[in-house]
Amino acid sequence: MIQQEIKFIEHYYQVISEYLMTYSMQLVGALLILIFGLWVAKKLRSVIAALMSKHNMDITLTNFVSNVVKVLIIVMFVIIALGKVGISVTPFVAAIGAASLGAGLALQGMLSNYGAGLAIIATRPFVVGDTIEVNGISGLVKDILLGHTILVDEEQVEITIPNKQIIGEVLHNSFAHSLVKGEIGIAYSADHKQAIDLIKQILTSHVNVASQPLSKVGIENFADSAVVISYRYWVPTDKIIESRLEINAQVYEAIQAACIEIPFPQRIVTLKQ
């Protein structure tokens, strides 16, 4: 039994020795090819990333393209190195093809998300920092990945949306800002022009309110007990809550300081004898 094991070890030792003697220079050459390929892939990735950044390309698209180029260069040099040591890559290609087919059937949902992610990166309907609304969900775009997109809403909650839920849907993009709406009711006997001017001054002086698009202030409707003054303004999406609270407080204080009546709901009841 021991002799058989020794013969078995000797046989494989002899095979390995003969292979190393025959392909020793080829192995060294293959190793040098791999090292050179890794160096070329790294350099080319850096050059492409720098070139795209110089032209103000989207960071997500820049990272994706540079990484794909790096992987393709490495795969190419691996194939060259395997051929150098006498290993045929045809069986590997066939096996990879069969595995890819099976994986594609099993991971259709994931692949559809990746395809949608590629479409988003290529067409750029929105970029990191934009404010979008899709399928009733809105938020600031924090990151765009191949499989999903991450939003952050006004309450700083992260929302992950599969990319296939974005492509093909109606998409609202307000870029870095979001629209905020507010309203306040004043008495019918009050000076509505004075109230509108006060609100305009507040919106113009507030640090978070954007100059473009312009803020809008005017009469929204005529309620039973009050004239409703509506105001709309744009603020950075990550400052929605604090801006709304501050501006509402300032509007209320300014209306009160100007002695403009803010009526409460009331009804006039007439009793007939």
Image: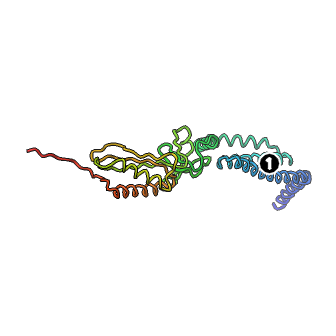
Dot 1: element: helix
Kindly identify which residue carries mark 1.
78
Q: Residue furthest bottom?
A: 2
Residue at x 77%, y 52% (from the top left corner)? 42
Q: Position of residue 18 (x, y in %)?
A: 90, 53
State whether residue 122 appears in this view.
Answer: yes
Determine crowd level at label 1: few under 14, some 14-19, many 20+ residues with C-alpha closer than 10 A: some
Residue at x 68%, y 43% (from the top left corner)? 99
Relative to residue 185, is residue 57 drawn left or right? right
Q: Position of residue 160 (x, y in %)?
A: 54, 50
Colour treatment of the image:
rainbow
Residue at x 34%, y 56% (from the top left corner)? 258
For the N terminus, the image quarter is bottom right
Relative to residue 151, is residue 219 drawn left or right? left
Relative to residue 120, is residue 205 drawn left or right? left
Number of numbered discs? 1
Q: Position of residue 58 (x, y in %)?
A: 65, 47
Tell which of 179 and 154 is nearer to you: 179
Q: Residue furthest top?
A: 168
Residue at x 57%, y 44% (from the top left corner)? 163
Tell which of 124 and 104 is nearer to you: 124
- Please name the amino acid that badge 1 sits on: Val
For the C terminus, the image quarter is top left
Q: Position of residue 151 (x, y in %)?
A: 54, 51
State whether residue 107 appears in this view.
Answer: no
Tell which of 4 and 174 is nearer to you: 174
